[in-house]
Every structure is written in C-alpha cells, then in structure tokens.
Amino acid sequence: MSITSKDLLRHLPSVEKLLQPLEGTASLPRALLVHLVRQEVQVIREEALGGKEPPGFDAVVVRVRVRLESFARSRIQPVINGTGVMIHTNLGRSPLSLNVADRLREIAWQYNNLELDLDSGERGKRARFLETGLAVLTGAEAATITNNCAAALVLILRHITGGERKEVVISRGQLIEIGGGFRVPEIMEASGAVLREVGTTNRVTIADYRRAIGPHTAMVLRVHRSNFYMEGFVTEPSAEELALLGRQHGLPVVDDLGSGAVVDTHLAGDIEHEPTPQEVLAAGVDLVCFSGDKLFGGPQAGIICGKAGLVAGIKRDPMFRALRCDRLVATALQETVVEYLAYMQGEGMDPRRAPLPLLEMLALRPEDLHPRAEAVVAALAGCPVSASVGEGTSRCGGGTMPKSELPSVTLDLEPQGQSLSAFARKLRTGSPPVQGYIAGDRVKLDLRTVFRSQDAALTTAIRAAAGA
Ligand SMILES: *Cc1c(COP(=O)(O)O)cnc(C)c1O
C-alpha cells in the first residue's frame, strides 16, 4: 500500500458519523442501515487502496443514500404492471382476488383449524375442504396440493417410479424447458426416473408409445408445451389415445398441464384453448398436475388431481411433507377454489364472468380500456410529458398460451427534457413503481394489466416521473 492511500484512508468518515445524516432514510430499520453503510464504506476503502481518491464526507453520504434507497426498493412491494403481460414471473405471477386477500388477512393473525377436526376435536386432515373442492372443480376422484408444479411432478414421478419399474415413456417433442430452470429431463433424473424417449421432435404416434412399453415401464408422461408451439408437420396422440394405451398395459398416464386453466380460455377472445384438467381427466388420464399461480389465478402451488389411489400414494411419500404448502397458501387456494365453484353452478366455465382478476383481465376488450386511457391522458394535461392513447398487444406470459396476442390499449408517453430510459427508470423507481415497456420513441403502459382502481395512482406516478 502506498503512503498516499494510507493517508487517504485516515480521512474516510466513520460509520457512526455517516449514520447521523442518514438516520431514517427509506424507513430502513437501523440494523440494515448500519449494514449497508458498512458495505459502502468498504467499497470506498477498496477503491482508495486501488489508488482512487476517496470522496469527501458529503459525497460519501450521497453514495450511501443511493445504496440505501436502491436496497429499500428491493423490499417486496406493490408494482403497477403496465407491461401487458398478465402472468409476469418477475411481478409475482398472477394477482389474487380481493376476496381471497381479505380471507388471507383474517387467517394470518389468528389460529385456525388447519389440522383440527372441529366435530371430533381430534387431529383432522390438513386442507380437507380444499382438496375436496379441487376434486369437484376438476371432476377428479381426489386432489392434493404441494409447493409448486415442479414439486408436483417430482412427487408423482417418485411415487410411480419408486418401485422396480423406473421407465417413463415420453415424447421427444415434450422434453421441454419451461424457464426458471425447469427442464423436464432434469426433473425426471432428479426424481430417480429413467427417461424412455419416443418419436421425433415434431411427430410421435401411438405406435411409437406402444413399442416403447416393456417390462421396465412405470408410466406414460405427457407434458404440455406451455411456452411455445409447433406448427406444420406435427402430430401426437390425443389424451384419449394415450389413456387407452395406458389402460391396455395397466400403466398410469400422467399429464403435466403446467398452466392449469379451469375455464375455457378460448371464450375470452380470439385466443387459443388451453387444455383444462377437467377435459384431460375426462379423457381417461390418471393424474394431472398444474401450477396454482398461472392461469388458475391463485397463489404459488402445485395442484395434483386424479385417481384416489395415486393421490393417496403421493401423500405418503416422505418428500410430500417436505414440499407441503403452509396455511396461508392453503387458504388462498381454498378461497380461489370457492370463487370458481360459486360461479360454476349451472353455467359452463366462461372466463368472461369469472370472479378472478386474472380472468377478468383476460376477457377485457380494447373498448373497455379506451375510456380509462382517455381519462388518464386528460388528467396528464399540462404535465411535461406528451401522452396519447395507443395500441398494444397483451400476452398471457408466465409460460402460458404463447400464441395468444390480445389487442390492447396503451398510454403512450413521450417525456420532455429527459431520455426515454431515464423516464422509464423514474417510473420504475417511483412510488408506487410502474413497469412499462419502451417501443420506438415512447414508453408504453398497457392498461389491461393495470387495475382500474390503480388509475389514479398511475396518473400521479406518471406526473412525478415526468417532473411535474
Ligand atoms: C410452468 C410449468 C411448470 C412449472 O410450474 P411451477 O409451478 O412454476 O413449478 C411445469 N410444467 C409445465 C408444463 C409448466 O408450464
């Protein structure tokens, strides 16, 4: 170390001195404040040792404050979603309904009957109401829940391939990656199953499956290509054909549906029909699994529905205990299922009348959004941003319905006196944060994914970011 750096280091402000002007910044608890101040001082110290001139006291305070504010923003908080992506993995996937959120609040602070049978006073079955509700909703003999759909698939594979027979027959066109590290072949390997690939990437026939079945076969697995689609010279057997093949050979057939729409998505607009657990189970498939927080519109969870014997076996696996859901998730799922069941009565499953925010969003048409966009644009008059009503394309996202592009309405914003990226950053780091997207020479905010009740907050956030 040179003498000069040593001298410079002596002039670095102490953590105690720095804390005084920073007390209370971004409402951070003191312990976090101290931790972050130390981190920044350490960075400055290393820079000084590397020969950089250390900043003066005020400049250090500014640097620490930037670090504190950036860290404070990383606290999980509401974000206004102007991306038009309805199930946005970075934004927590699907929002819950307000009814569900109210029930969560009630359950969160009080004791509850999670495992108490109120009739007998004895220990009861965990989440019995929810499991029965899910079975009724999907037309299954039985149902259960676990941490997420990846865990559901692991548990299914462990249970069915846990004996002598370990081979899982699966189409080459379904050895897919869903994103966030979910790769079907790796999940299978981690579960102790042996992959038995059949067909080619684009074509597989029932004869291919039949030929692959042998003395070591444990099950047939189908995985829904949730996040991409294949067109052209493509064939694969239907759920019915596979179910029949399974019955002929005494093998369970399992379908990982991933997205888990229980409504008829194609009724919501000009979008694809997402296979539902109801129709796949009715086709004779033994088990299905899907996510709770994709098109189902609930919390993160994996839902398993199907034959009672298989579901009971899965629940006996020691890993089931390790991957189970807590009471808050169980409550959120339970109330989501109640919402579905309540509106299911009599009618079919039309998403246009579904009581869940995700499905309401899915069913919105541009003409529903136009008046809102015009009102926000009017409220931005006189603000240093040129705002207009534009067009956009919303998507389901979260690795679901990749084909579906829904025409939508956007707020198109051109900031004055600042760059697009600076303006987008101000929106994102404001309060509440607003996430949009940049297209051409403007920042666009898709109103499909902004709740009507957020319009006022959105207007205020835009004004603030524009510097009004
Ligand atoms: C999304 C998805 C999964 C993973 O679901 P998580 O709930 O995120 O674990 C598994 N399989 C398919 C087909 C999916 O689309």
Image: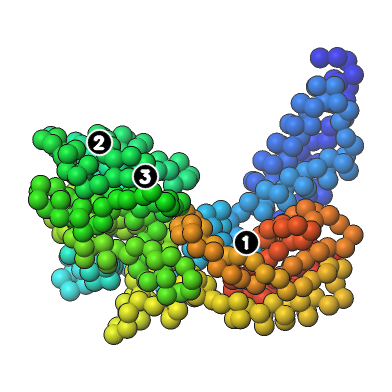
Marking on residue 196: 2
Residue 305 shown left or right of residue 330 in the figure:
left
Residue at disc 1, secondary structure: loop
Looking at marks 3 and 2 on the same chain, the residue that comes earlier in the sequence is marked by 2
Residue beneath the point at 48% across and 57% down: 402
The quarter of the picture where residue 456 lies is bottom right
Badge 3 marks a residue whose secondary structure is: loop
In 3D space, how far apart are the residues under numbered discs 1 and 2 (Cα atoms)?
A: 40 Å
Neighbour tally class for label 3: few under 14, some 14-19, many 20 plus, Cα within 10 Å: some
Q: Secondary structure at mark 2?
A: strand
Q: Which residue is mark 1?
A: 83
The span from disc 3 to disc 2 (Cα, nearest Å) is 17 Å
* Precedes in sequence: disc 1 or disc 2: 1
Decide if residue 409 is on the left or right side of residue 177. Answer: right
Say which residue label 3 marks: 202
Decide if residue 389 is on the left or right side of residue 164. Answer: right
Q: Residue at x 72, y 80 (%)?
A: 374
The image quarter containing residue 342 is bottom left
Q: Quadrant of residue 411?
A: bottom right
